[in-house]
Image (tube, rainbow, N blue to C red):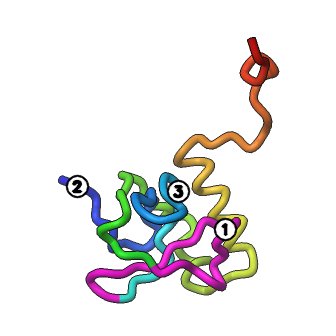
Amino acid sequence: MKPEVHQLGRVVLSKQGHDKGKAFLVVGLLDEKHVLIADGGSRKLCKPKKKQAKHLTPKPWVATEILASIRDRAQTADSDIRKALRTYLNISTRPQDKEDHTFV
């Protein structure tokens, strides 16, 4: 069964728009067609992006550990969102090996 986009804390990838391919968390539900998404960096929890659900690809992970901070709009919620996205998507924040950046 395909994961549902309309679930708080769901990890999603954008399929359309200038943020195509970028990872977000669902931080709000508006109606059956729209959700609010944030990544804790360019899109903070205080100003989430309204996005159509059909333009998002749901991933099988839900960040249940930060749902309370999202609901409470806690001060540390943005850092929690960034940490959850790094955890679930294995995104490295440190630079890659030098060999990866050398030109031939």
Under mark 1, the amino acid is Gly
Residue 72: percent from left, percent from top? 61, 86
Judged from this view, the residue extending furthest toward the top is: 104
Cα separation, mark 1 vs mark 3, equals: 10 Å
Q: Which residue is mark 1?
A: 40
Does residue 51 lie above or below 5 as drawn?
A: below
Q: Earlier in the sequence, mark 1 or mark 2?
A: 2
Residue 50: percent from left, percent from top? 47, 81
Residue 20: percent from left, percent from top? 48, 57
Cα separation, mark 1 vs mark 2, equals: 26 Å
Q: Quadrant of residue 82?
A: bottom right
Q: Earlier in the sequence, mark 1 or mark 3?
A: 3
Q: Which residues are magenta?
A: 31-50
- Relative horizontal placement of residue 71, taking residue 42 as reference (left or right): left
Say what secondary structure mark 3 lies in.
strand
* Magenta residue check for 41: yes
Does residue 3 lie above or below 72 as drawn?
A: above
Say what secondary structure mark 2 lies in.
loop
- Residue 16 tag number: none
Q: Main secondary structure of the magenta part?
A: loop
